[in-house]
Amino acid sequence: MRIAVVGAGGVGGAFGAALAKAGADVTFIARGAHLAAMKSKGLRIEGGRGETHLVPTQATDDPGSVGPVDYVLFCVKLWDVESAGQHIKPLVGPNTAVIPLQNGIDAPERLIPIVGQRAVMGGVAQISASIVEPGAVRQVGTFMRLLFGELDGAKSARGEALYAMCKKAGFDVTLSDQIVTELWMKFTLLATNASLIALVRQPIGRVRDDPDMKPQFVAAYNEVIAVGKARGVKLPADALDRMLAFNAGAPPAMKPSMALDLERGNRIELPWLGGKVVELGRQLGVPTPTHAFMYAALKPYVMGTPT
């Protein structure tokens, strides 16, 4: 099984290394110092699940040198979807599955015009991990889960084959026939948690049980749930309870990647997370006052720390 991982950060690095260790033929598409380190020293994954050192690591900045693969795990930042989509065209053959694992909800619809309707599946990655130095990714806690499926809910041989490889790799995996619902469940959680935790600049353990903060989580989750339902998404009746249960069980030190990017002074994915909630709310006539405030407060940091 040939797999290309596009973007070898916390998500792509961790899942790609696990799949490579399980025997898949994995190539990382990366750039800069991270690419150089992987080529010279290999890729190291450290954290709660132990250490994996992938030596040698197959890595390149040229998808054309790899050619068509069976699967593409598409893990770039949301602002790079279109440019990276064009870049990976040499990886996509007639039977290739491209699985975007971004934080937002619109990556599949943005990729389809570039690589084709048939190529794109839906995917959700759940992990807290980030690059700590070139060639090294650190995971917070042990939670590591991948959900994926065909966008129309159909069963497919390619889905079953990847599911089997993920089981062999040893992380939690679900082959879903409701991947659009799963995407919206993650979006509900992350659009809220990324904005709130970035805003207060504290890990989830410091804010989830605060009696003054919990109502803000609840209000923000309910806004996204209302937007999703207005858009026709079939969300479970206990969606809010699942959000709160996730928070209760999350490692106390966990921070969403957007909060980490903000702390480092980097560009943040706000327009595709909280900003997308506000945008869709306006389009659908659904009030989103909590997200509107958080979006307004964080907007000066969209392109990095203001100078």
Image (cartoon, rainbow, N blue to C red):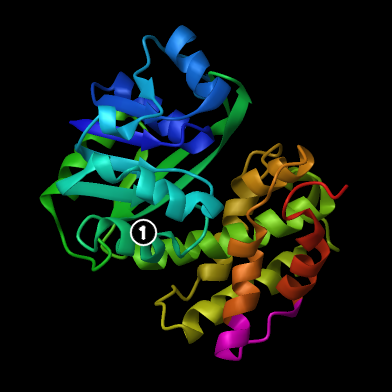
Residue 159 seen in this snapshot: yes
User: From what the image shows, is residue 148 above or below residue 243?
Assistant: above
**Percent position of residue 195, x then y:** 71, 58
Tell me what residue is drawn at x 70 percent, y 41 percent: 260
Q: Is residue 42 above or below residue 226?
A: above
Q: Is residue 287 magenta?
A: yes
Front residue of 53/40: it is: 40
Q: Residues within 10 Å of mark 1 (few under 14, many from 20)?
A: many
Left or right of 97? Residue 226 is: right
At a point 51% along the width and 50% down the height, the residue shown is 80
Q: Is residue 180 left or right of residue 25?
A: right
> Residue at 53% across / 18% down in the picture?
135
The one nearer the camera, 37 or 282, is 37
The answer to whether any part of residue 50 appears in the image is: no
List x then y, in percent, for residue 52: 45, 16
In this rendered view, identify the residue nearer to me: 280 or 140.
280
**Tally of numbered discs:** 1
Q: Position of residue 187 (x, y in %)?
A: 53, 62
- Residue ID for mark 1: 111
x 72%, y 55%: residue: 302
Secondary structure beneath disc 1? helix
- At label 1, the amino acid type is Leu
Quarter of the rendering occupied by the N terminus: top left
Above or below residue 3? Residue 151 is: below
Which region of the structure is painted magenta? 281-289
Find out whether residue 106 is within the magenta segment.
no
Q: Quadrant of residue 221?
A: bottom right
Residue 266 position, x and y percent, is 72, 42
Instruction: Report which quarter residue 66 is drawn in.
Output: top left
